[in-house]
Image (tube, rainbow, N blue to C red):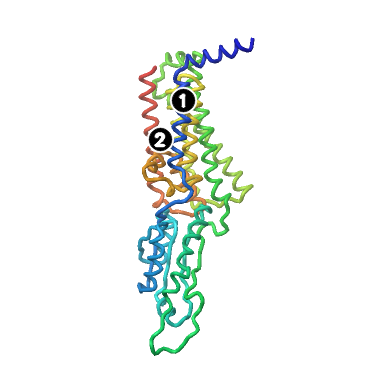
Amino acid sequence: MILAIIKKEFLQLRRDPRLIGLIVVMPLFLLILFGMALKLEPQNVRMAYFDEDESFFTNLIKTTLWSDGYFDLYEVDSKQEIIEEIRSGRAKAGLYIDQDFSSLITENSQPHIIFYVDGTMPSLTTAMKYHSGGITDEGVTNDMYFSGADAENVVIAQDPFIMDTVILFNPDEKETWFFLPGVIGVLIMQIALILTGISVVREREKGTLEQLLVTPLSKTTLILGKLIPYIIIALLDFYFILGAGWLLFDLPQPSSHFLLFVLALTYVAVMISLGLLISLIAKTQQQAMFIAIFIIVPSILLSGFIFPIEAIPEAVRTISYAIPFTYFVEIIRGLLIKQTEFSDLFYAFAALLGFVVIFIIASIVKFRRTL
């Protein structure tokens, strides 16, 4: 008897070639993609620097950082601009050297330099601190000892200068501050894609879709009518989850509650419209679930939520920027942790809004062609 049931299940799967394709092709595609893309150690991490001294000694420090290949240095015009570059996300680290650095070195007075680090991603913070340590190695500092032929003997400090490391935005390197804002996006993505992804398919399987189509409603009205209830549900869920994060894990308050609401509304609209498109493409609820998983897994791994985008090879990084969740992670971390201004997040908001428009238009076109 059990063999008959097994045979029946295999026959049902054979009648759904699209589902078999998803079962076989999707794992293979993700395996190859993640094998190429996922790296823990980034290269060419952007570092803004402001060198007021511009001397042989400071060039030695900058050259050591540059030659390691880990940091990609570029110059800014002030100490404050270093912090703003890191806040905006254009840089992950910064270096400030005061104008009296050389004079203090020659006086053997151990000048200080400041190394700024973006603390929003603790694993990357640790890696940056490790690589910055190269500028205080003996191989570098030994080149800073000098004496003239007629100079008096002086007692030279073991370390000719001191590097002060300042961790910005998340000084205690709390991992919950790093993970939880992204976790909120993942939960909303799952809820929205699964709720909406099976909505039209379920209507089609139950035979109620034809009844809706004979009503006087236009197809656009029908699409919007199916979107709006799920947008309201997902929006309420967003604030419920975020409120729990504030209450239980002491997440920081945003720089602007209005921008946070705009983010929530836009992101939910993206996910719901994407779920609706999935529902129109899939023929069965099983297909809809597989397509949703096919979107969720790369979103988690390629968006910068867990692994730094800087570590992803440039050839694959384009995929990261084609994922809506990438922009959500950037905005919510900016609002909650870095207190970033709207001007620095504008392009990310614009990208999310663009996804909404694209998915809704694609849904309307697909709806008109298939029904």
Quarter of the image that includes the N terminus = top right
* Residue in front for this viewpoint, 10 or 52: 10
* Other-residue count near label 2 (Cα within 10 Å), few / some / many at <14 / 14–19 / ≥20: many
Q: How many marks?
A: 2
- Circle 2/circle 1 CB separation < 8 Å: no
Query: Quadrant location of residue 277?
Result: top left
Q: Which residue is mark 2?
A: 356
Residue designated by label 1: 22
Residue 34 appears in the figure = yes
Q: Quadrant of residue 48?
A: bottom left
Foreground of the two, 216 or 91: 91
Q: Nearer the viewer, residue 1 or 327?
A: 1
The answer to whether residue 151 is above or below residue 59 is below
- The mark closer to the camera, 2 or 1, is 1
Marks 2/1: CA–CA distance: 25 Å
The crowd level at tag 1 (other Cα within 10 Å; few <14, some 14-19, many 20+) is some
